[in-house]
Amino acid sequence: PPALKYWMQKQQRKFDKVPPIEDLVLHGQNVRDWWRDLQPEWRLRDDIPWPLARKECGDEQWTGLTRGGSHGFVLILCCIAWWSMKGGEEVVDQVLSVLDDVEWVLNSMMRNMRKRYVGLTGASDGEAKR
């Protein structure tokens, strides 16, 4: 999203700086589009851009979201936080919808990682939860 680009280039990635966001609707759409672009193909639906598909198949691939970087996943959370901070009550439903999806993805990623760990080590699921 342009706000993220501005923050990274002009505000030197300082977490106490919030980039200017002139159009909340456009920023929200940019955040959703970016989040959507990071998703695996199986989550995307041609007929409905939002909400994204959810299924529990247990073998999901999350390569678009598991890449590292200078701040990694935190950048997604920053964009959502700025949207919320600038929009307040006006955008609360849209922000909560995106946060709900982010939470679902993180939980799915953790379940997938736990299954892989248990499979590799032979640890019991209880040991993997520690």
Image (cartoon, rainbow, N blue to C red):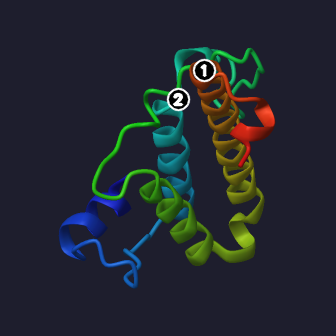
Instruction: Tell me where residue 39 appears, x and y as whole percent.
Output: 53, 29
Closer-to-camera residue (65/34): 65
Instruction: Tell me where residue 92 appears, x and y as whole percent.
Output: 74, 65
| CB within 8 Å, label 2 to label 1 | yes
Q: Mark 2 — residue?
A: 39
Residue shown at 25% from the left, 65% from the top = 8
Question: What kind of residue is marked 2?
Answer: Gln
Residue shown at 72% from the left, 70% from the top = 90
Q: Which mark is residue 13?
A: none
**CA–CA distance between discs 2 and 1?**
8 Å
Closer-to-camera residue (118/63): 118
Residue shown at 37% from the left, 74% from the top = 19
What secondary structure is found at the residue carrying circle 2? Answer: loop
* 50 relative to 76, above or below: above
Query: Looking at the rendering, which quadrant does residue 110 occupy?
Result: top right
Q: Which mark is residue 44?
A: 1
* 37 relative to 9, above or below: above
What secondary structure is found at the residue carrying circle 1? Answer: loop
Instruction: Tell me where residue 116 appears, x and y as whole percent.
Output: 60, 23
Residue 81 placement, left or right of 65? right
Residue at the bottom extreme of this rendering: 16
Residue shown at 70% from the left, 48% from the top = 103
Instruction: Tell me where residue 119 appears, x and y as whole percent.
Output: 63, 19
- Near mark 2 (Cα within 10 A), the count class, few <14, some 14-19 or many ≥20, is some
* 108 relative to 92, above or below: above
